[in-house]
Amino acid sequence: MPITSQQVRALRAESHRLQLKPVVMIGNNGLSENVMQELEQALSHHELIKIRVPALDKADKKELIATICERTDSQLIQTIGFVAVLFRANPEKQRFAKLLK
């Protein structure tokens, strides 16, 4: 389900308000199976997470984040430097349901 620009703004503000720290850090080895499992687990549990990507050039970083979003079925909320904020709704938890209405 695509989210609107207003919902993106609300989730961006929420990630700042909660002072989220990166929960998954991707090393120089890239997207290993273990990293993908950690991403899936973090998104299922928290819904809104920050990840730290390795120091790559802009195009490679953008491609890596797009690959992560595609493989985890999550949506990119924001990127600042080497940190990206991702969101995937969990129907069981619905922590951010009020923001998405």
Image: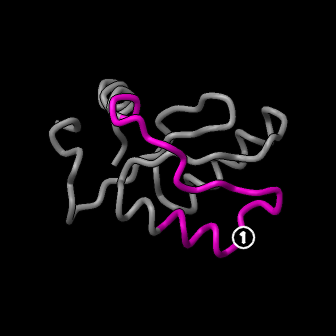
Residue at x-position 54% and y-position 47%: 22
Secondary structure beneath disc 1? loop
Residue 15, given in percent of the width and then of the height, sits at 39, 35
- Which is nearer the eye, 69 or 54? 54
Which color mode does the image show?
A: one colour
Residue at x-position 55% and y-position 73%: 37
Note whether 46 is above or below 7 in the view shown: below
- Which is nearer the eye, 58 or 48? 48
Which quadrant of the view contains residue 57? Answer: top right
Left or right, residue 58 beside residue 101: right
**Residue 32 located within the stretch drawn in magenta:** yes
Which quadrant of the view contains residue 7? Answer: top left
Residue 24, given in percent of the width and then of the height, sits at 58, 56
Residue at x-position 37% and y-position 31%: 8
Q: Which amino acid type is shown beneath numbered disc 1?
A: Ser
Note whether 100 is above or below 80 in the view shown: below
Q: Which residue is mark 1?
A: 32
Residue 92, given in percent of the width and then of the height, sits at 20, 65
Which quadrant of the view contains residue 2? Answer: top left
Q: Quadrant of the C terminus?
A: top left
Left or right, residue 7 beside residue 21: left
Note whether 63 is above or below 94 in the view shown: above
The segment highlighted magenta reads: 15-40
